[in-house]
Image (cartoon, rainbow, N blue to C red):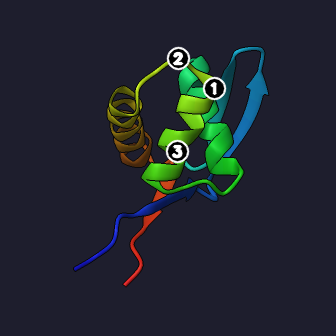
């Protein structure tokens, strides 16, 4: 049985935190991505090595008035999009 993945920013991605949002640049594709306040908080957690789903959910719940269910669903959606664009990498411990 495999554990859940841990996510971290891709080495091909640089980020700048701005007021209430973040901007990401994928160095390989030269594409920019803008993250809203919630997604920027998730990115900040990833940069702080909080890369597992439970830790990310707790991080969001501490910062926003949101239930763990809603936070978890947002995290799943966001991580899927970030991974599909090569902005984060997922590692599953064996």
Determine contact: label 1, label 2, CB under 8 Å: no
Q: Which residue occupies the extreme left position in the image?
A: 1
In this rendering, is residue 89 above or below 58?
below
Q: Which mark, by number, is residue 63?
A: 1
Distance between the Cα atoms at labels 1 and 2? 7 Å
Q: Residues within 10 Å of mark 3 (few under 14, many from 20)?
A: many
As helix, strand or loop, the secondary structure at mark 3 comes to helix
Corner quadrant of residue 22: top right
Residue in the foreground of this view, choosing between 39 and 62: 62
Q: Which mark, by number, is residue 56?
A: 3
Residue in the foreground of this view, choosing between 43 and 86: 43
Q: Residue at x 35, y 64 (%)?
A: 4
Determine contact: label 3, label 2, CB under 8 Å: no
Please say whether residue 31 is visible from this viewpoint. no
Q: Which residue occupies the extreme bottom position in the image?
A: 94
Residue in the foreground of this view, choosing between 20 and 85: 20
Image x and y of residue 66, in percent: 46, 21
Q: Residue at x 40, y 64 (%)?
A: 5
Q: Quadrant of the N terminus?
A: bottom left
Image x and y of residue 17, in percent: 76, 28
Q: Quadrant of the C terminus?
A: bottom left
Distance between the Cα atoms at labels 1 and 3? 11 Å
Give the residue pinned by disc 2. Answer: 65
Indicate which disc, 3 or 2, sits on the residue closer to the N terminus: 3
């Amino acid at each position: 049985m495999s554990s859940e993945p841990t996510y971290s920013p891709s080495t091909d991605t640089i980020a700048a935190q701005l007021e209430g949002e973040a901007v990401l640049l994928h160095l390989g594709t030269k594409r920019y991505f803008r993250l809203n306040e919630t997604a920027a908080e998730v990115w900040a957690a990833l940069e702080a090595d909080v890369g597992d789903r439970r830790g990310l959910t707790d991080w969001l719940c501490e910062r926003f008035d949101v239930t763990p269910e809603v936070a978890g669903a947002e995290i799943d959606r966001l991580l899927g999009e970030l991974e599909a664009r090569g902005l984060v990498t997922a590692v599953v411990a064996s």
